Structure formats: structure tokens, C-alpha cells
Amino acid sequence: MKLIVCDSYDEMSKKAAEIVSDVINENPSAILGLATGSTPEGMYKELVEAYKDGKLDFSKVSTVNLDEYVGIDPSNPQSYQSFMNENLFDRVNINKENTHLPKEIGSLEESVKAYDKLLAEIGQRDLQLLGIGPNGHIAFNEPDEKLNMHTSIIDLKDETIEANSRFFDSKDDVPKQAMSMGMADIFNSKTLLVLASGKNKHKAVEKFMHTDKIETLFPMSFINLHPNCYLIVDKDAYQG
């Protein structure tokens, strides 16, 4: 694992965007695994600016996203589909037919199978972006005695619902479930790019830096198993 400590959120965002840009420039048909949330917003802004400056071309890029809320329409402003449209897809020259998020198609079981099939067809990603939760979750794989290998429906922990409530009118409005890639899906990537920003992520980062164990109760610990991983943090996340 390559640890990069940045002085600020902006510096972290720029460094992450540089890594993603290098992947696209080396392979214009790159397959990217993307993430949502407040942490990667700055990185997406940097990528949009690089596109506007003629330094990036997304026309042949394909993407898959980690997760999506259950029971929320893709047109809802709080859906992850809307997040991706607003922060990246609507602002660059990507072909939206080549962008994919989990979606509800019939029953939840059918939806899970459909996304699993899609991920199998797309194959290994060139890069997978990840954020981490304050409790160490990655995607929506919450701390538990067992973790799923492939796409599944996750019951969100109360601390995750609380953390995401800032995006909704109230905590009661936050969906209680999400459809998420499993751990094997996440690791099916040549490179992992993990971002952590803010003091609320410090405990998770500190625990990660001081453990030599792999724990399902701390999903972030599995990052240590990937052969090519970047962990980029700002000082608030690193120092607390």
C-alpha cells in the first residue's frame, strides 16, 4: 500500500485526480469503478476541469459504481445516480450508456443478480475508487461477522444512517438499505484508490494504520490484501 498524506482536502483531491487522469490517458478505454459521497467531490471537480482544459477524454471510458440506495428513484436528487450526473457524467463527454449503477429491476433478488451479471461481463476494472466510513465500512459493506463477496442488499448501520443524514431533510428520510458491490467485486481492480478526509475519519484511519489483522468487523482492513493500493488522506483524517 502507498500512503500519501496531504496538507488539505484540495491537495488530496488534486492528487487523486492525477492518478485517475494517468489511468485514462494511458488507456482511453479504461474501466473505472466510481464512488459517491462528499469525499470524492473535489476529485470529480478536478477531473471536470482537466476535461475542460482538453487534458482528458472520457468518450471511450466505462464506469461502474459501488452502490445505490434501495427504495429511492434514480431521479431523486439524493440518489447516487443524480450525484454522479451532477458531479461528473453531465459535465464531461462520457457516453452515459457506458455508465452503470446498481438499480432496482423487478425484485431486489433480480436486481442483485442483474448487477452481478453486469460486473462479470465488464470484468476487471483498471481503477476502483473507494471512500471509507467512520466505522471502517467500504462501499456499504458494514462491519459484521460475515461480509458478502458479491452484490447484495445491505441493512445500513445506525452510524452510517447518521453520517448520511446531512444530505437529507432528516435522519428519518435516509434510506435504511442499499445495494452494494461485495468485497470480491471491489477487489477485482488493478488499482484501488482509497480516499479519507476529515476528523470524523481519523479513528478509522488510525486503526487501519496500527493493525496487522484482517477483520470483518473492520472492512477497511481488507485493503491491505490488495497488491496495488493508494491510500490518500488529508491531515485532518491522518492526525485527527
Image (cartoon, rainbow, N blue to C red):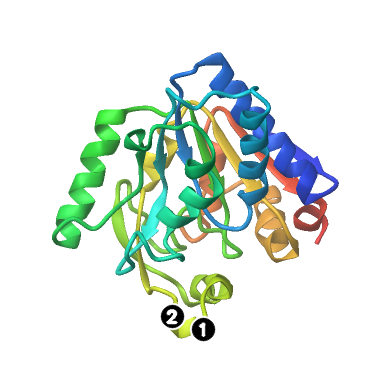
Circle 2 sits on which residue? 173
Q: Is residue 15 above or below residue 215?
A: above
Screen quadrant of the C terminus = bottom right
Left or right, residue 93 beside residue 208: left
Numbered mark located on residue 31 in the image:
none
Rendering quarter of residue 59: top left
**Number of marks:** 2
Indicate the amino acid at tag 2: Asp
Question: In the structure shown, which secondary structural element does the residue marked by tag 2 occupy?
Answer: helix
Q: Position of residue 2 (x, y in %)?
A: 69, 32
Indicate the amino acid at tag 1: Ser
Label 2 crowd (10 A; few <14 / some 14-19 / many >=20): few
Whether tag 1 and tag 2 are in contact, CB under 8 A, the answer is yes
Q: Is residue 115 above or below residue 187?
A: below
Circle 1 sits on which residue? 170
Q: Position of residue 144 (x, y in %)?
A: 42, 64
Q: Residue furthest top?
A: 26
Q: Is residue 203 above or below residue 238?
A: below
Query: Residue 135 versus residue 126: which sits nearer the camera?
Result: 126
Residue occupying image coordinates x 54% and y 77%: 162
Rendering quarter of residue 64: top left
Q: Position of residue 131 (x, y in %)?
A: 57, 51
Question: In the structure shown, which secondary structural element does the residue marked by tag 1 occupy?
Answer: loop
Q: Position of residue 35 (x, y in %)?
A: 50, 48
Screen quadrant of the N terminus = top right
Label 1 crowd (10 A; few <14 / some 14-19 / many >=20): few
Structural distance between the alpha carbons of marks 1 and 2: 5 Å
Residue occupying image coordinates x 41% and y 70%: 156
Q: Is residue 212 above or below residue 92?
A: below
